Image (spheres, rainbow, N blue to C red):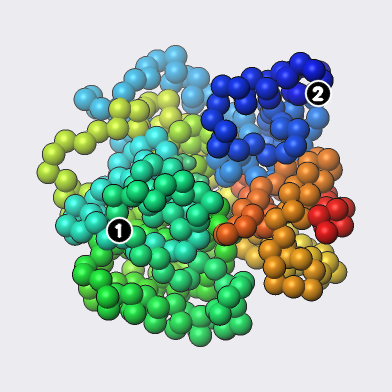
Amino acid sequence: PSGGLSRGPDKGLRGRHQAVLPDWLALYYADPLELTHGEGRHVWDADGNKYLDFFGGILTTMTAHALPEVTKAVSEQAGRINHSSTLYLNRPMVDLAERIAALSGIPDARVFFTTSGTEANDTALLLATAYRRSNQILAMRNSYHGRSFSSVGITGNKGWSPTSLSPLQTLYVHGGVRTRGPYAHLDDAEFIAACVADLEDLLGHVRAPAALIAEPVQGVGGFTSPPDGLYAAFREVLQERGILWIADEVQTGWGRTGDHFWGWQAHAQNGPPDILTFAKGIGNGMSIGGVVARAEIMNCLDSNSISTFGGTQVTMAAGLANLTYLLEHDLQGNARRVGGPLIERLRAVAAQLPGVREVRGRGLMVGVELVQPGTDLADPDAAAAVLEAAREEGLLIGKGGGHSTSVLRIAPPLSLTAAEAEGGAAMLERALRRGLRKGG
Ligand code: PMP
C-alpha cells in the first residue's frame, strides 16, 4: 500500500490535508479515500482496492474514466500549445462553442467559456442583472449554484451558503422539494399550480427581478424531481414581466437525464431558457464551465470582460473529444436504457425497506431519500452509514439533500453498462440493508 492514508500514528496524507487545507473542504468517509487511477466506470484507491464509481466525482466524469479519446486529445494539445484563450483566435474554443450553441436550443446563441460552474453562474448573474438593470434574483428553495460571493447569495441550500452578505437581493420560490411540507401530498398539476401561485404572490410584492435561476433537477439538493412542465408554467408568468429564465444545467446537461439532452427540455412548452449555464461533465474532469445566451443578452455588457483560463486549448480539446464520444455512442440513450431499469430495481428494494422514503430520478441521475422508519423525518445518520457501507461493498455513491443530508445520490459515468448497473444495485442493496440498521 502507498499513498499514506491515515492508518497509524503517522497522520499521512489525511493529516497533511487537514493541516494545510480549509476545515470547510469536506471529505467523504471516516477514513477518506485517495483515488489513484480509474478506467471505464471503475476507480482504484491507494491501497489497490477497486470500486464501481456511481458518483463520477460529482458528475465530472461524464463518459468514462481515462477515456482514451480524451487522453489522446489532451496530451496532443498539451504538446502543442496551452495558454490563455483570450487575445488570439483559438480554434478548439470556436469549434466547441459552435457545437454547444447548436445543441443548446437557444436561438442566436453565443457561448462564453469559464473555468467552473460557479464562474458560469456568476457570469449569468452579471448578464441578467446588467440586461435588466436589477439586482433582484428569484431562486429556488434548496438550490445550489456555486461558491462565489454572488452565487452563494442565490443558493437556497443553507448548508452550502456560508455568508448572507450577498450583493444580490434574492427571493426564494417553491418548487424544488416535493417530499415534505405542505406540498408533499399534491399531485403534479396541483403542485405546479401551488408553486405558480407562490411565484405570483412574490412578484406582487417586488419591483422587477432580473431573472429566475433554477436547476431543472436539483443536484446538491438531493436529485429532486419537479413535475415536467413546472418551469414552463413559471416561464409564462416570468415572460409577461420580462423576467429572464436561467437554467443551471451544471448537473443536468449532456444527456444525464436520459429523456433529454438538457434538463430544461422537460419544461420546454414555452421555449428554451434565456440563459443556460454548464460545467462539470463536459470536460470529463478538465475545468470547463460556460454560459449560453441569446446574442442580445450576451452582448449587453458594454465593457471588456475576460476569463483568462476559460477556454484554454487543452480543456477545449478535452471537451470536443468527450462530446464527440458522447454523441457518437448515444450515451444519452444509454442513460435512458440503463437508468430506467436501475431506478425500477432500486424501487423494488426500497419497497422492502421502511427507511427509504423515495427512489426518484431520471436517466442516470438517481436519488434515494432516507427517513427515520415510520416517520417523515430525514435521516442523515443513515445516509452517512449507507455511504460507508457502500464503500465497503466496493461502490462509491454521493449524498445530498436540502436542510439535512439524507439523500443518496447516484450519477455514474454515462457509459455505464446494464451489467454494471445491476452489480452496483446489488452492492447498494446490501449497503442499504447494513447501513439502515446501523444508522437506526
Ligand atoms: N451549479 C450546480 C447545479 C452545481 O451542482 C454546482 C457544483 N456542485 C455548481 C453550480 C458550481 O460548480 P463548480 O463547483 O464547478 O463551481
Q: Where residue 33 sits: x, y (%)? A: 71, 31
Residue 109 to residue 201: above or below: above
Res. 169 mark:
1
Q: Which badge, 2 or 1, comes first in the chain's sequence?
A: 2
Q: Nearer the viewer, residue 122 or 201?
A: 201
Residue 112 located left or right of residue 192: left
User: In the rendered structure, which amino acid carries the disc numbered 1?
Assistant: Gln
Residue 239 to residue 416: above or below: below
The reply to whether dot 2 and dot 1 touch (C-beta < 8 Å) is no
Q: CA distance from mark 2 to mark 1?
A: 47 Å
User: In the rendered structure, which amino acid carries the disc numbered 2?
Assistant: Arg
Residue at x 62% of width, y 63% of height: 361
Q: Where residue 432 sits: x, y (%)? A: 82, 56
Image quarter of the N terminus: top right
Kindly state the secondary structure of the residue where label 1 is placed.
strand
Q: Nearer the viewer, residue 35 or 425?
A: 35
Res. 7 mark:
2
